[in-house]
């Protein structure tokens, strides 16, 4: 039976509401962290607090990734997104209360983001056609990069506008979080699609024996490790090379713009293919070129290397979203794979800033930390190849 014009219009309106809500949710996925690096020179933190601040986000996102599937099963996917954004908003507000609030709020905000990291790819698969997954995962990464970049660029100006108050500057991240909550409200009463993520017949632990799952986990984990090192230390690297703190923030913002571009282009191109090994290698090569430029080139050329580096990081961070969809048979296995990859991947990433900071303290410069990153990137090119080949994980339990 042909669909009537009012029905088509209603479907179009619903899809528009879903898309707008999705965009605002994605905008908040890294905006909380974007302002920290540029503001570190003004915060006068003890070394222990600074190390904790850089390690807590990926550590919490690894430890609490399973909450995404738990929230979805208990409350439904839309309500789970709303709850996760609410937790994120509370965390941002807590961060505005001094150093102790900064650390506690970072934990709370990261718990919300951990759930969102798992929920958003499943939300895409549930609400958009298979032909749209690549574009939507590209939008996911693009908005994530834009949010972080916007906060990185505005952090220092907001700090000065607030009379030298970094809590107020960081607290401004609550504004887009509240907007995301409002955008999700129309979805909370939705009844035209399944709202719950039913518990699959087999637990996720079977993935632990699947080499492809570990390949994707390793690739994602190392790329996240690289991202958090850049997010935490890129402004400091350029300040040591002669840039001002504001310029360091701009360079980080440019890398976030690169993340937005690479995060959109990478999965959009990858979704059209079945073999994703070329895309995995391209993301690694771009990161290597970018870090070599950061290490060897003058500070004045920083914008170029920041954009190249960001493009590689963005593509590498977004490609696993396509792999979750392309390597699994249904959304249940997709949620399981996403949960495993993000749990272990973020735990791997949590070690990055700590190791890089320790190498900097030991060597007194940035050559050894960046050499460490470059070595990991070369390794990552090999690690990701198995997960990138054309095959299906979980179609028949433990076989691929």
Image: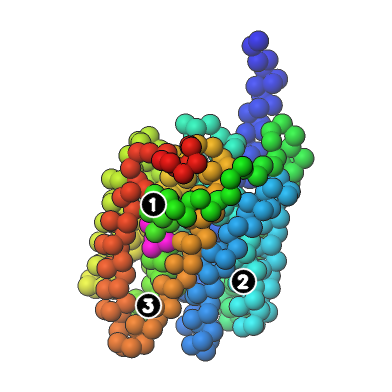
Q: CA distance from mark 1 to mark 3?
A: 28 Å
Q: Is residue 128 magenta-colored?
A: no
Residue under label 3, please give it.
Answer: 356
How has the structure been colored for display?
A: rainbow
Earlier sequence position, callout 3 versus callout 2: 2
Residue denoted by label 2: 107
Q: Which residues are magenta?
A: 219-223
* Residue 377: quarter of image: bottom left
Q: Secondary structure at mark 2?
A: helix
The quadrant of the image that shows the N terminus is: top right
Does 146 sit above or below residue 293?
A: above
N-terminal of the pair, mark 1 or mark 3, is 1
Question: Residue at the spot x=39%, y=49% of the render?
Answer: 212
Mark 1 lies on residue: 211
Q: Is residue 297 left or right of residue 327?
A: left
* Mark before the other along the chain sequence, 1 or 2: 2
Q: Position of residue 352 (x, y in %)?
A: 41, 72
**Who is closer to the viewer here, 99 or 340?**
340
Where does residue 215 sit, x and y in percent of width and height?
Answer: 38, 54
Q: The residue tagged with tag 3: helix, strand or loop? A: helix
User: Which of labels 1 and 2 is toward the front?
Assistant: 1
* Residue 98 screen position, x and y as percent: 65, 82
Q: Mark 2, residues whose alpha carbon is within 10 Å: few (<14), some, or many (≥20)?
A: many
Q: CA distance from mark 1 to mark 2?
A: 31 Å
Who's the residue at 69% across and 53% down the image? 71
Q: At which x and y percent is residue 210?
A: 42, 50
Judge whether 9 appears above or below 37 on screen. Answer: above
Taking the image as shown, residue 271 lies to the left or right of residue 374, namely right
Q: Residue at the spot x=67%, y=48% of the render?
A: 72
């Amino acid at each position: 039976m042909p669909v009537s014009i009012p029905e088509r219009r209603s479907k179009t309106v619903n899809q528009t509401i879903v898309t707008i809500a999705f965009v605002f949710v994605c905008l908040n996925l890294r905006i909380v962290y974007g302002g920290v690096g540029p503001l570190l020179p003004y915060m006068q933190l003890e070394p222990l607090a600074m190390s904790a601040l850089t390690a807590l986000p990926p550590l919490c996102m690894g430890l609490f990734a399973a909450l995404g599937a738990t929230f979805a099963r208990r409350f439904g996917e839309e309500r789970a997104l709303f709850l996760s954004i609410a937790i994120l908003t509370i965390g941002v507000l807590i961060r505005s209360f001094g150093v102790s609030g900064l650390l506690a709020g970072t934990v709370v905000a990261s718990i919300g983001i951990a759930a969102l990291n798992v929920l958003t790819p499943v939300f895409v698969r549930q609400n958009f056609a298979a032909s749209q997954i690549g574009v939507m995962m590209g939008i996911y990464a693009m908005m994530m990069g834009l949010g972080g970049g916007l906060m990185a660029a505005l952090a220092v100006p907001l700090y000065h506008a607030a009379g030298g108050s970094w809590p107020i500057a960081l607290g401004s991240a609550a504004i887009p979080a509240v907007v995301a909550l409002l955008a999700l409200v129309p979805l909370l009463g939705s009844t035209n699609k399944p709202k719950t993520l039913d518990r699959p017949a087999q637990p996720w632990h079977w993935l632990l024996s699947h080499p492809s799952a570990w390949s994707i986990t390793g690739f994602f984990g190392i790329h996240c490790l690289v991202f958090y090192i850049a997010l935490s230390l890129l402004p400091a690297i350029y300040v040591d090379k002669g840039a001002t703190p504001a310029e360091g923030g701009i360079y980080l913002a440019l890398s976030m713009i690169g993340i937005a571009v690479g995060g959109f282009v990478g999965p959009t191109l990858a979704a059209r293919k079945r073999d994703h090994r070329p895309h995995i290698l391209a993301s690694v090569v771009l990161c290597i070129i970018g870090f070599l430029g950061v290490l060897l080139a003058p500070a004045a050329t920083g914008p170029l290397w920041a954009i190249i580096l960001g493009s590689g990081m963005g593509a590498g961070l977004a490609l696993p979203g396509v792999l979750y969809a392309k390597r699994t048979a249904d959304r249940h296995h997709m949620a399981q794979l996403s949960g495993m990859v993000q749990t272990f991947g973020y735990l791997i990433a949590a070690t990055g800033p700590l190791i890089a900071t320790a190498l900097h303290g030991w060597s007194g410069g940035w050559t050894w930390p960046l050499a460490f990153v470059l070595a990991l990137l070369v390794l990552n090119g090999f690690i990701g190849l198995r997960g990138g080949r054309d095959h299906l994980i979980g179609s028949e339990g433990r076989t691929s």
